[in-house]
Image (cartoon, coloured by chain):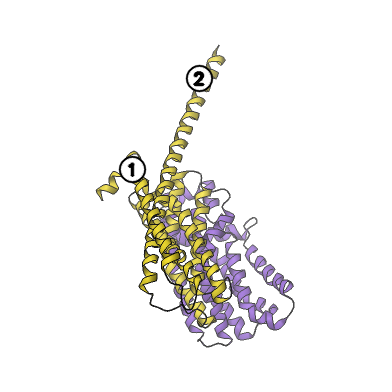
Chain colours: A purple, B yellow
Amino acid sequence: MSGFLALVRRDLALSLRIGGGASFALVFFLMIVTLTPFAIGPDLNLLARIAPAILWIGAVLATLIGLDRLFQADAEDGTLDLLKAGRLPLEGIVLAKCLAHWLTTGLPLALAAPLFGLLLAMEPAGMAAAALSLLIGTPALTFIGAVGAALTAGIRRGGVLIAILALPLMIPVLIFGVAACNAAVGGTIPFSTPLAILGALTLIFAVIGVIGAAAGLRQVD
Amino acid sequence: MTIINQLANPTRFMALSGRLLPWIAGMGAVCLIIGFYGAWFRAPADYQQGETIRIMYVHVPAAWLAMLFYTLMTLSAVGALVWRHPLAEVAQKAAAPIGACFALVCLITGALWGRPMWGTYWVWDARLTSMLVLLLIYLAIIALWRTVDEPAQAGRAVSILTLVGFVNIPIIKFSVDWWNTLHQPASVFRMGGPTIHPSMLWPLLICAVGLSLAAVALHLVAMRTEIMRRRIRTLTILAADRADRAAGMAGYGSAAQ
């Protein structure tokens, strides 16, 4: 357990210091939220209607940031070999690194979602729903991305490949995330239904993603 | 199981597949000729959909085969990861482009069929979307194959991705169904009817068998090509290694003089 926490703390420290890029995801998220109104026009009604979609697309794309270095940096400088030789199982290593990644991407996005929702003319209920759905759903995105990151850890130009590998698998999370936001501001289904499924997806992918990523890391030399 | 174990020897596989291939391809061709003859000249036009129903004889087998080849890839991935069967990796690599092609054929024929029937080439119907996502997963797998240059390493990475994708496919299917029923009423997408008349069923089944045999023949050819490609790769590396060593000896010799 101490090894697990130490690894989380190390990854957090690495991403918060210079060259880490912990703030990239949030800035990127803000960029997407800003660019969309320029593309579709300043129609507040339309923006309010598609705001959950913009926030969730932004979250999906922002999660990809940092994924390409999630395991690659450690594989390159030999840290990964050292971690593999340690007592913490590879699955635990993956979980610790996913947690650190989520703390620097998913969590800030979820916390910033109400503020960005303001820019997109969301109702207060919608903002709260967006924040809650992102809080519950973004860990799933990280776990899915971890599989792609592990499989491309040994490849030099893995960045775009991660997006190609992970994005199709992120579709269910996107669907239920947006559905939860829409259900909160009206609609026929109760808010809790998509939210519960979103939680289930996060749990499922916590298992699949961690096992898959650990298997992927084992084949990296 | 013994046969599968024996086939771990590529030479034995090459001999066996070389003997089987003409028969499979020939039977596939015969089935396709009979099936397409039935589909074009024997099967009646649908009373609602008219002549466009004939697209079905390619569309439906293509959809089946797109899913069947993913299952084949999953089984191969298990074989490659669990038993380290050398042929499983080759089978998996050869299957990916074929499955992707069938998914694409299914989507294109579906679009051509949808235009006269539904009035549009594409709708975000649950089934169409699922097939599109399946195509995307196929493309991701092919992309991973084409990025890692060491075949053994690529094989293991792709096997893991294939298995993760296989676990995800039911989840994606469920979520897309849920998403679709939420957004649009299923009023446009009623097919001609749940039951299919025997006069249409037999050409469909023969077409399906013919296309499956053709797919298996293509798969065998692709596997043989892949085995040959790996042999050439090994021989090239060995030759380069030998040339390198010879050059090094010569260089050492001249330096010593």
How far apart are the two marked residues, 1 and 2, measured between alpha carbons? 45 Å
Give the amino acid type for the residue marked by disc 1 in the picture: Arg
Q: Quadrant of residue A39?
A: bottom right
In the rendered image, residue A41, in percent from the top left (x then y), is placed at 74, 76
Q: Which residue is mark 1?
A: B19
What residue is at 44 percent from the left and 47 percent from the top? Answer: B222
Which percent across, then down, holds residue B54? 47, 68
Amino acid type indicated by mark 2: Met
User: Compared to A63, does B96 lie above or below?
Assistant: above
Name the chain letter of the residue that bears numbered label 1. B
Point out residue B60 in the picture as x, y percentages from the top left corner. 44, 66
Task: Please say whether residue A43 is visible from this viewpoint.
Answer: yes
Q: Quadrant of residue A163?
A: bottom right
Residue at the (54%, 75%) spot, across then down: B117
Q: Nearer the viewer, mark 1 or mark 2?
A: 1
- Relative depth, front residue between B129 and A117: B129
Numbered mark located on residue B237 in the image: none
Mark 1 lies on a secondary structure that is helix
Task: Give the class, few, some or many, for how many residues have Cα within 10 Å of label 1's Cα (few <14, many ≥20).
Answer: few
